[in-house]
Amino acid sequence: MYLDETVTDKCSRFIILLLELLIVNALLQVLTWADFMSVGRIFWGPKRTTMLFSLGYAVCNLAVGVVAHYRFVRGDQILRHALLCMFFYVLLTSGILALLKMPLWMYKPVVVFYVLLTVLVVLHRFVWRQGFKAYRLQPRHRHKVVFVGPVSNALPLFEEMTGNPYTGYDVLGYFADEPDADNQHDVPRLGSPAEAADWITDHHYMLHQAYCTLPPEREEAKQVLHACENHLVRFFVVPGVRNYVTHRMHFEFLRGVPVLSLRYEPLELLPNRMLKRTFDVLVSGLFLFTLFPLIYIAVAIAVKWSSPGPVLFKQQRSGQDGRVFWCYKFRSMRLNKESDEKQATANDPRVTRVGHFIRRTNIDELPQFINVLRGEMSIVGPRPHMIKHTEQYSQLIDKYMVRHYVKPGITGWAQVSGFRGETRELWQMEGRVKKDIWYIEHWTLVLDLFIIYKTVVQMFKHDPQAY
């Protein structure tokens, strides 16, 4: 959530862009002096090459945006925007160089430039973040605010403003019918909502913002609005929906009507879907055409030796939007009639000796890169379940079907967070669903890379849930 991007914030964003363009130019100049960047000399000359790289960076920076100057922002969000900007920058500029038929031997200095620039951009934005923290700690740069209505209706915002001084807010107090039990920061109750308008009128010289959590039918809300509008105090309405919706939501205007959608899903945005799909295609394609044939031959010999039957096992599973698809795995069990209904259990007699090994190391899941390349799955996402289990759990677990808003994955946040393998108790599946929904609402490419890293680590460690 990013509130009130002021003129100062817009100027800061512009300054960040200018400084990063200087970093691009300075880095190109240094590499040119070091006789390492020969691209410019061969194509258009150093000046035109520098102009190309600078213009490309400006386009990508403006398209992705900068969040280091926002008041409510986490470190991972700053990192994500920086890496996303660099990802599109590399795609854009390397694509142009490819169209210019740049020789392969020249890509080495270009790759060095990309790596150094990524490091410098990330460091630059975190330095700015620390600067903004110091700036907002100064008394003359802080915003004085009050809340009108129950604090519980805006509790996360209230706690962030009162508990995190780096946001730059000082909460002077709140107006409520009764003292609010959710107030854990000793913020004073200034009176009832009926007294708020007069208080704002008398103290407007020291007040910057007012956040109203009252229901719209309360007359006091209108009085506070008028008092703020007449005394240069910015007025914000906090919809009272947190009593029944406790996770973050997405706000937009539809035909001029303000609408809150139930949840914010990063993968609903086309650039994010394109980024994730590009990553899936590149990684799955590289794996399938290099390592997979060798792995397939070795596993096929072992599977055929362990028991009669096909090397690959395919099963119908529930995919995105509930669509059914054929999911591929290396066969780890003897042929049986329960494979479409019964999960693997500890010491399952159906699992072969080879099957125990490939299941424990996740090797049995590798053919699903075929599903990824075909667009039925993603490398990271909620694990696809058997059709029968989807039908059962959708009736037993609240919000179970939400996990089908995105493509299923070879690995997922639930699997690296302790919810891998058999679900003997209902609470285990409930925990898996909660983790899957959290992933859907917090997706970033950095999170995907972290999950892949955790999955690889698990492959080389004994996981008691892997059987």
Image (cartoon, rainbow, N blue to C red):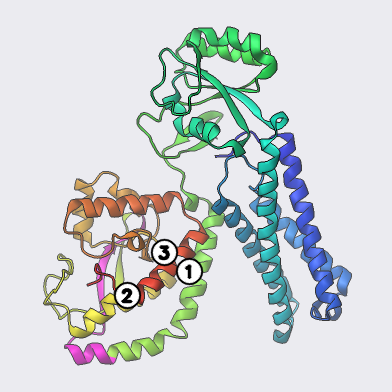
Residue 412 in the image: state x and y as whole percent.
37, 62
Q: Which residue is mark 3?
A: 380
359 vs 98, left or right, is left
Residue at horizontal 43%, vertical 42%?
A: 263
Q: Disc 1 on helix, strand or loop?
A: helix
Q: Which residue is mark 2?
A: 362
Q: Looking at numbered disc 2 in the image, what kind of residue is underneath it?
A: Asn
Q: Looking at numbered disc 1 in the image, what kind of residue is underneath it?
A: Asp
Q: CA distance from mark 2 to mark 3?
A: 14 Å
The disc at residue 280 is 1
Image: magenta residue range: 301-321
**Closer to the camera: disc 2 or disc 3?**
2
At label 1, counting other C-alpha atoms closer than 10 Å, the crowd grade (few under 14, some 14-19, many 20 or more) is: many
Q: Disc 3 on helix, strand or loop?
A: strand
Q: Looking at numbered disc 3 in the image, what kind of residue is underneath it?
A: Val
**Closer to the camera: disc 3 or disc 1?**
3
Q: Which tag, 2 or 1, sits closer to the chain's start?
A: 1
Q: CA distance from mark 3 to mark 1?
A: 9 Å
Q: Is residue 423 above or below residue 201?
A: below
Residue at horizontal 25%, vertical 90%?
A: 302
Asked if the residue under mark 1 is in contact with the one under mark 2, i.e. CB atoms within 8 Å, the reply is no
Residue 144 in the image: state x and y as whole percent.
63, 24
Residue 375 seen by the camera: no
Residue 105 in the image: state x and y as whole percent.
72, 86
Q: Disc 2 on helix, strand or loop?
A: loop
**Closer to the camera: disc 2 or disc 1?**
2
At label 3, counting other C-alpha atoms closer than 10 Å, the crowd grade (few under 14, some 14-19, many 20 or more) is: many
Asked if the residue under mark 1 is in contact with the one under mark 3, i.e. CB atoms within 8 Å, the reply is no
At label 2, counting other C-alpha atoms closer than 10 Å, the crowd grade (few under 14, some 14-19, many 20 or more) is: many
Q: Which tag, 2 or 3, sits closer to the chain's start?
A: 2
Picture quarter with the N terminus: top right
Residue 342 is covered by the magenta coloring: no
